Image (cartoon, coloured by chain):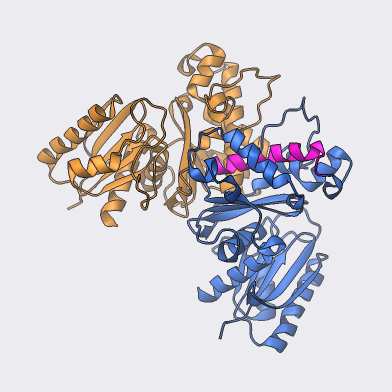
Chain colours: A orange, B blue
Amino acid sequence: MTPLYGAVEAGGTKFVCLVGSGPDDIRAEARFPTTTPAETLGRTFAFFREQRARHGALAAVGFGSFGPVDLDPGSPSYGRITSTPKPGWADTDIVGAARAALDVPIGFDTDVNAAAMGEWRWGAALGLDTIVYLTVGTGIGGGGLIGGRPMHGLVHPEMGHTWVPHDRAADPFAGCCPFHGDCLEGLASGPAMRARWAMAAEDLPAGHPAWRLEAHYLAYAVANFVCTLSPQRVILGGGVMTSPHVLALVREAVVSLLNGYVQVPAILDRIDDYIVAPGLGARSGVLGGLVLAEQCARA
Amino acid sequence: MTPLYGAVEAGGTKFVCLVGSGPDDIRAEARFPTTTPAETLGRTFAFFREQRARHGALAAVGFGSFGPVDLDPGSPSYGRITSTPKPGWADTDIVGAARAALDVPIGFDTDVNAAAMGEWRWGAALGLDTIVYLTVGTGIGGGGLIGGRPMHGLVHPEMGHTWVPHDRAADPFAGCCPFHGDCLEGLASGPAMRARWAMAAEDLPAGHPAWRLEAHYLAYAVANFVCTLSPQRVILGGGVMTSPHVLALVREAVVSLLNGYVQVPAILDRIDDYIVAPGLGARSGVLGGLVLAEQCARA
């Protein structure tokens, strides 16, 4: 019998919880707004206890969490959200609380590393071992797998806070990142688009110049990730990327920027298959939580 | 008895060859200019045959090579320099020629991944598993280890060809990269400094504004690598970095750019120990070749 797992996409605006063993076997799903840690984690644990009563024991539960988080198993603050500016959430011990409440092994990683793992296991990155997953929405976040393992290192990537060229003559918008002004997130997140054009990204029509500018910044970022990490595929998810033509504009701009320097067929001849949308749509993150659960159950 | 290995730093301007088992046991070393592949590889193989006659068999030979190179063991062009613009060197089969000439296992990676491995084994990155090594000289190249393994992926990193913000009002120099104009290499390599200031980097005095501008660009790049890869340490080598104060200026600018966003003591409190010079000086690359040899002898 296939073991059942729990998965949580713990986002800054909402939590998505799921019980199942994969995208074709989802037994239950719930989503609720992220309020206080006590209330939000309380609802999360109540959901899993209820599902456990209905479907039987869960072998493990995996959390893909907003951050920054501590991923170092040797650290005293392992499993915590650390220095987030989100009110009430700094120093929240996700793994400790989950272990105490559910008494099963708890997998834990960033939301974007989890999404990359979901895409690697069931989505757009099947069979690959070095991939980047970038989400462009309320914020911009990136993670990935290198040699089949999620990216950790000193802390974990913060790809939204990299810098790209910003021509202030062409785009005088100063950027809206409270830490960095015109880093990628400051120039190209959903809130940046809203601040620059006085209109929400979802309301900007497909032919609006906003989209070519958006693709321009994202293409610089993707080209930088390509030259820094040499991924086998780049997956672009998040709300801003659901606009119909932006993915095609990003691909075109990346090829133009790289200008033949990285001479591989994946980029020169098959860009549509190199920079792609998530195969799991909006569920990459929560399904990645199932992969985290699977892996920690086996460890 | 410790096995003896051969190592080669195969650079675009010179080849450095060495026989030994580590930095404290170097039996012989030779360097010669990079001319044609036949002549340069001929001298390389002759050196190892001569040393073998003197010191006994070599267990393996490792090459850290200029690129781009093919690192995929499953590819028909594995072990070759591929699409380099360097006259005569495109499609040169380093590994095939070395196996045929020396009849020992041949390790192979980029020059910068090799340098990272040298620093990891004996230099400034002892005990770490996720590091970036950047060389700033005639070109700018970067590599590293992630989770203890050299960075490969689709091809290998080309970190010198990432983009950083370029304020043309403050620095009207257009950049000198033939592919990208004002990518990092186009703005901050040795030739870029010479073209901008009409003076070679080594002749620019320590207080010259060139150095603050150089540190400014390198700091953007380092901050981007920190946010993309989350390395445990960043090692900056190469000719340009031997100028006395530039490393300190880079550290200062990185801290200022990140602006407290990555809240870890390594960056907030110990930046001098986070962004460092190579522990092996100019020998990181060739000693890294010994590590490549060791690893392939064991495989």
- Report whether residue A227 is seen: yes
**In terms of depth relative to the viewer, which is nearer, B163 or B204?**
B204
**In-image side of A258 versus B74 (left or right):** right
Most prominent secondary structure in the magenta stretch? Answer: helix
Instruction: Tell me residue B108's x, y (percent).
Output: 62, 66
**In-image side of B107 versus A139 (left or right):** right
Instruction: Tell me residue A40's x, y (percent).
Output: 25, 29
Residue that lies at the very extreme toward the right in this rendered image: B198
Instruction: Tell me residue A51's x, y (percent).
Output: 15, 37
Q: Which quadrant of the structure image shows residue A213?
A: top right
Residue sitting at x 58%, y 29%: A183
Residue that lies at the very extreme toward the left in this rendered image: A53
Q: Which residues are magenta?
A: B206-227
Residue B208 magenta: yes
Residue A141 magenta: no
Instruction: Tell me residue A158's x, y (percent).
Output: 49, 38
**In-image side of B8 versus A24 (left or right):** right
When the figure is inspected, residue B12 is found, relative to residue B192, above or below; the finding is below
